[in-house]
Image: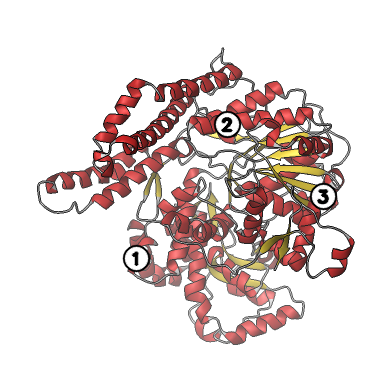
Amino acid sequence: MVRRGLVFLMAALRPILYATNRVFATRVVHSVLRGVSRDRLDLLGEEYFQYKLKPYLKPEGVARLKKLQASGADVVLVSQGLDHVMRPLAKYLGVRWMLVNRLDFRDRIATGRLLTPVIRPRGLFARITGAGPDGEREPLRLVRELGVADVSQMNAGVVSSKRRATCEPRPIVYFDGSRHAEPLSIRLALGGKHVMLIGVTGFIGKVWLVNTLLDLPEIGKIYLLIRRQKSNPAEARFEKMVEESPVFDPLHDRYGVGLAKFLREKVEVVEGDVTAPMLGLSEAMGAQLGRDLDVIINSSGLTDFNPDLRDALATNVDAALQVAEFVRSSDRCGLVHLSTWYVAGARDGRVSEKVRPNYTPVGLVDFDAEQEWRALHGIVKDAEARAESAEVTAELREQAVGKEHAARDLQGAALENQIRKNRIRWLRNYLTDAGMQRARELGWPNTYTLSKSLAESLLGKYGADLPIAIVRPAIVETSVGKPFSGWNEGINTSASLSYLLGTNFRQLPSNERKRLDLIPVDSVCQGMTLIAAAVVERRHDALYQLATSVTNPCDMGRSIELTSLAHRKHYRAQEGLESWLLLRMDAIPVSKRRYKRMSAPAQKAIVQSIQRIMAPLPVKKPLAKAERGLERVEKLVELFEPFILQNEHDFVADNVEKLSHALVPEERETFGYDTRSLDWWEYWIDIHIPALRRWTYPLIEGRPLEVRAARSLRAVNVTLATEPAAAAQEPVKTGTDGATWRFS
């Protein structure tokens, strides 16, 4: 309100100030923008162009400009407006250079001062004398109109119309003497090689598979270890995935009806189970893969924060050890194991790329990861035995008999069946709580991070003599360019919170200085490919972190503001009172104390008070739905508090940058790892939040995703019908049972 009052005051004083000194007046008018972030000004400038300037552009003037550009002239856009407004105009017109007013910023916040030169208004009669479509000016005339000293001073104020200049290459210095003198070539390292991918049904696995098939068609063979789901075999699961997932669209676009043939040559589905000995493979298949494989990429894992302890141990710890044992039994196979940077737990400061055996965030001196692993399995066995005890059975029987639903009057077999269901629920809840409790005792926020850290320690112990590289990606989010810009899948880490910030929820408890370490999924996949090549050539490090908190930091305060601005951009394009209100509800980072006093907890307390007052009345509780919604908000915020409010981490990501630096020049554009040049404004507002609105928010709201054109990959035992000659010459085999896929 204060800023709006100042704006109205400046509007009233503007004619008087301009009459005295136009440069001084321009400086004073822009001083009201002090304290506004660059990100907000960029979005407001884009809004102003879209809804105020663009509709009034003169077609004749635009046509003359395009004609001038076609002749080879280098056009400079000159305006008294701010660069935040003129940049969208320059982009629309295709102009590369601007001479405009620019604000001074400190830590992305405007100081209210204009940088030199100040572009003053043209004068009182400018709208009359310059009303024509021809805005071309000679340099000397422009110098006089702008009031600058000379042409050189004017030229010094010309800036690029791009949002951000290209990031300069970072020098690489090897202090430990571990530099490999020979360059790295991905095509030579992985060309003709056999790779097994575990976890292809996950977000990262799909993207890595598609990107590799697009960028590295000379790879020998990619084996996909997929588990059978009851009556749904592995081949059918992969077929359904290729048919339905949009991530495979670029492959369909490139190969069309030839996609089936390409998949036959490059992909083989292997049915197995990563949690079983020898990965659940048959003896023959295990022996074949042991001879043929060059590297395994294990991107599988259970990512639920607080799962059943049995599931967490089996999927995140036991499976990692099974893969390591398979690598040990192979001829030359290496391993790239995906962990997570969350394993750092409740600690602050810089996290180096060094494997720490028997690590705990609380720093227990006598902690032994193997003993902890066995102790957790012991907790599972004890819980399973206790669930069958007479004491728990009696408790479960009492619950079943006293339940206020159809099971209340059950007897005999029906009652025993209800007790069995209650026992399953009791055991699951008990082991979920046990995992959460133990994780927090050791300094991890949840069972997921505990299990991932145990896997790292055990791999370091049992795989010390094996070619293993552990990879810790940060929060993996929407793709920037590959397989296409704006791909995301499922309800991932940031989706729920970003969705919440797009509602009338405004106050998120967070540490605005804490760096939110987020990385696009295609950057993660590029890093994985580099690391896999390094493992194959035995030039790898033990640990790689794929993160942005050091290379390109974005703190929580900025992340929340960018999310709010992205929602504003969406609602600005909508119609209706609700959208008009929501675009004005910016979320802000607040302290935990203010959140409890003014946000969801306080609102829930008010709702509960009203409910208690209404309880004696013979009417349905009017605010029950609102109370449940506020409870969900509280639980969601509590779940993510360790990652948005507590613990300030900075994750070093030097090792992968060293690999990228070692790439041969001709492969850097395709396989290079680069997070430094990522523009968070463009990523958040133009890519990430729109992608979540398209692929994730419908799932949160219970709505179906967008309708897509049907396509089919049908399993057949003959070659493509479009290739009759080839059908007579060679049998078509792929996967484990000779099936292939036909694209139609």
Q: Is residue 565 above or below residue 88?
A: above
Residue 219, numbered label = 3
Tell me the crowding category of disc 3: few under 14, some 14 to 19, or many 20 or more residues within 10 angstroms, Cα based. many
Residue 578, numbered label = 1
Residue 314, numbered label = 2
- Cα separation between marks 2 and 1: 47 Å
- Cα separation between marks 3 and 1: 52 Å
Indicate the quadrant containing the C terminus: top left, top right, bottom left or bottom right: bottom right
Residue 724, numbered label = none
Indicate the quadrant containing the N terminus: top left, top right, bottom left or bottom right: bottom left
Front label number (3 vs 1): 3
* SS category of the residue bearing label 2: helix
- Under mark 3, the amino acid is Ile
Q: Nearer the N terminus, badge 3 or badge 2?
A: 3
- Cα separation between marks 3 and 2: 31 Å
Q: Is residue 698 above or below residue 673?
A: below
